[in-house]
Image (cartoon, rainbow, N blue to C red):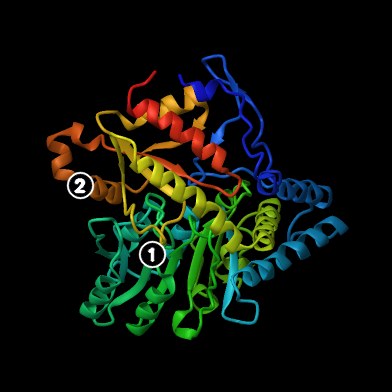
Amino acid sequence: MSSSSNKKRTIGEKNLDYRKIFLGVDVKFKLENGKKLIPIGFDNGATTPALKCVFDEVYNNLLIYGSIGRGQGPKGELSTRKYEESRDKVLKFFNLQDTNTHTVIYTKTTTESLNILANILIKNKNDKVLTTRMEHHANDLPWRKNATVEYVDVDELGRIKIEDIENKLKKENGNIKIVSVTGASNVTGYINPIHEIARLAHKYGAIIVVDGAQLVAHKEVDMKGKDPSEQIDFLVFSAHKIYAPFGSGVIVGLIKDLDVKEPFVKGGGCVDYVFDDNVIWSEPPSLHEAGSPNFIGAMAMVRALEELKKIGFENIYNHERKIKDYLIEEMKKIDNVIIYGDTENTEDRLGVISFNIKNKDCYKVADIFAKESAVSLRAGKFCAHPYVARLLKVSNSYEEYEKNLDDADFGMVRLSIGLYNTMEEAKIFIDELKRIALDIY
């Protein structure tokens, strides 16, 4: 399709220090058009490649892997000790090592984590939760099912107004039990001021839950905050977005609120005694980890966190910011390209850029990128339908949907940056985007 695709790719030559620590990012693939190319992974908002140190961690722990908390034996006892010690490493990562307020619960995903919280923190349907129209479905639908949900809308550029959060909290006069908000948007990359939101939540008697799926790999999160009013009460995230894609997730949360009458998921490992006519449940975190623990997943995730900390979040942020800023500035110059969100003041945006090309189907655009030049993007509504509808300025009403089904087929193309991405990859993307947008084939 393009001359740049025919050139020999030397992706990452100027940035070996980051790229060389990742697994599989330089493996060539043969495309349908016959070309053999190293794929460009610009879909990190969905999932990320593994760090090499994570691969090593998995291998080394498979050598000593035994049953966690069940039975005796050298392997099982060592695995159990490492599994329990890993919780302390997670707490340290979020600056909670010197507190006795939080614990770590291992889950499968961010989605499962939020479902667990919605089922144990909410006592009845009349409990009120405040969230936003920026959220991923995982931080919306579980609350809808279990509670009465109030929403803060977004402004014209897709940001949340902090004053709107306080206005809602003030209006409800202490009736809001939980404020649940994304740490960073998976559509626009906007970073929300979670500590400022925490202060407001606590001021009006609520606790805060932060969906950190898009945040943890890109920016340092200090859950302790500068003072108790800034404390993040609950944070959830997934390993597969922090370069450890092995099916594990985390709840870091307040012990006092996790010490509930009974868990959402029930079975072995979460009980002390089961009688014919009664059950004595375990204490958190075991209370919420029924079934066989994902030891390998936990080890992989913690190793990835340690590597990110070692690299340094200032280095991570600056590296990704340079690529993001270049992409936005170059995309603004291309006729027919529409970028969503603020493209002038981008300091509060992570490397997530959603766009469309006028008069071109978003799925077709992403398909051309993939099949012609091995660029991985995502197309659609990104599991954030209400937010995408607002950015596109289209109706998200079910009544309107029933009237005209075609109106529901809206979407965007999303590019999301990871630590291993390079400026060379960004330049290849821009070249391809120009050709697609300007119909130069």
Q: Residues within 10 Å of mark 1 (few under 14, many from 20)?
A: many
Front-most of 86 and 219? Answer: 219
x and y, in percent, of residue 58 in the image = 74, 48
Q: Is residue 152 left or right of residue 3?
A: left
Of the pair 252 and 280, the residue shown nearer to us: 252
> Which of the marked residues, 1 or 2, is nearer the chain's N terminus?
1
Q: CA distance from mark 1 to mark 2?
A: 22 Å
Q: Pinpoint residue 319: horizontal percent, then vertical percent.
A: 56, 53
Mark 2 secondary-structure assignment = loop
Please rate how many residues cluster around mark 2, counting C-alpha atoms within 10 Å: few if below 14, some from 14 to 19, many from 20: few
Q: Amino acid at mark 1?
A: Val
Q: Residue furthest right?
A: 74
Q: Nearer the viewer, mark 1 or mark 2?
A: 2
Eyeballing the image, is 46 above or below 177?
above
Task: Residue 259 in the image: state x and y as whole percent.
Answer: 53, 75
Image mark for residue 181: 1
Residue 199 vs 42, above or below: the answer is: below
User: What residue is disc 2 on?
Assistant: 393
| Contact check, label 1 and label 2, Cβ < 8 Å | no
- In this rendering, position of residue 293 left or right of residue 426: right
Secondary structure at badge 1 equals strand
Whole-percent x and y of residue 382?
38, 44
Q: Residue at x 53, y 44 (%)?
A: 47
**Residue at x-position 37% and y-position 44%:** 354
